[in-house]
Image (tube, rainbow, N blue to C red):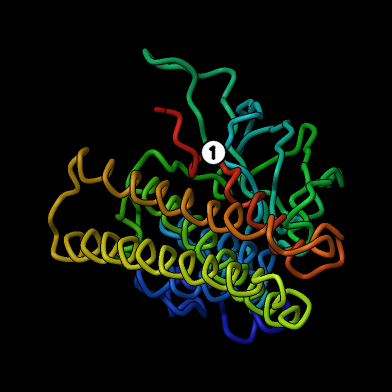
Amino acid sequence: MLEIIYELRLFKLFVPDELGGRMTPLPEALQWFEQCSWADGSFGWLVTIGAGGGFFVPYMDASTARRLFSGREAVVAGSGYPSGTARRVEGGYEVSGRWQYCSGSTHATLFTANAYITDESDSSGQKMRSFIFRPEQVDIVRDWTAFGLRATESHTITVDRVFVPEEMTFDLAGKPIHYNDPIYSYPFLPFAQSSFAAVALGIAKHLVEEARRVTDHNREAWGATGRYFSVRNKIKQTEDRWQRAADAFYGCIQQSWNRHVEGLPHTEEQQQEVSRVCKTTASMALACGQALFPYMGIRSVMEDAPINRIWRDLQTACQHSLLVSFDD
């Protein structure tokens, strides 16, 4: 599966062409994330996370970005949570920390993580900076034991007093320092939320299709009681609901992207609307599983049943905090 990703450059959807990437507008990239997630949840999640690492390119030193991202297999794993500390030393920083849920940890060619600089502060508190680690600097704690998205290798990483030179650091709170593709100036939160919502859409679509396959396989056994036609009707209703949500999602993102490309600023209200649509989309995707899974028969509770794996992947993907509404 990694070979397919490398061949299609799916980890490089947001990497400049001159670095071997295939720079892609956000709405088109989301279609890729959905389709990959439809094929397999872990596959889609890894493509989405890996491609998202390209967002960091314009914040890095230009020569560093070229060196790190030009390779055919270049891909980032890491964490945005600032669970590390850094101390300034001659030529760079000494960094220690522990970061959870680093998807793609076992095939990453570089790792990024955020840490607070312990000996520097401003009026708002400690300064945070992003650090780039080489694989040999990182210890992988193989603790990803989730019941879904198992193949994402979303393990914890640790570093202990690792030296990171200045050119292997960057500041995501600042402005991009080179490359001016529109994706790099698109607000990061809507970018991340729409990416994960597309994953949820793809997995949910696969679940609906697999539910139809399971139902048709049991037509003879279920038909005498009317169960077959009842479940088929539920599938059709769920499929229609999925399509309405997908249309609303892509319509919202396309409108937001068009405004951005035209140079119009995103107001706080507009960003909140994108966030709301993404969360609603994920909620709908999760509801697809809840609507159909109970009717798939006792075989569906077995871990080796395809629909069981799809259902577990869907539950896991939609557990991401960026897709959960805490306002209710």
Decide: is 58 above or below 99: below
Residue plotted at (56% across, 25% down): 117
Residue plotted at (72% across, 57% down): 149
Please indicate whether residue 318 sits to the left or right of residue 102 in the image: left
Q: Quadrant of residue 105?
A: bottom right
Image quadrant occupied by the N terminus: bottom right
Q: Residue 261 or 70: which is nearer the viewer?
A: 261
| Amino acid type indicated by mark 1 | Ser
Please indicate whether residue 129 sits to the left or right of residue 109 in the image: left
Please indicate whether residue 120 sits to the left or right of residue 24 in the image: right
Q: Quadrant of residue 69?
A: bottom right
Residue plotted at (66% across, 54% down): 77
Q: Secondary structure at mark 1?
A: helix
Where residue 58 sits: x, y (%)?
A: 41, 58
Where residue 244 sits: x, y (%)?
A: 35, 65
What residue is shown with label 1? 321
- Could one spot residue 65 in this view of the protein? yes
Q: Quadrant of residue 235?
A: bottom right
Decide: is 129 above or below 255: above
- Could one spot residue 63 in this view of the protein? no
Where residue 231 sits: x, y (%)?
A: 60, 68
Image quadrant occupied by the C terminus: top left
Badge 1, how many Cα within 10 Å: few under 14, some, many 20+? few
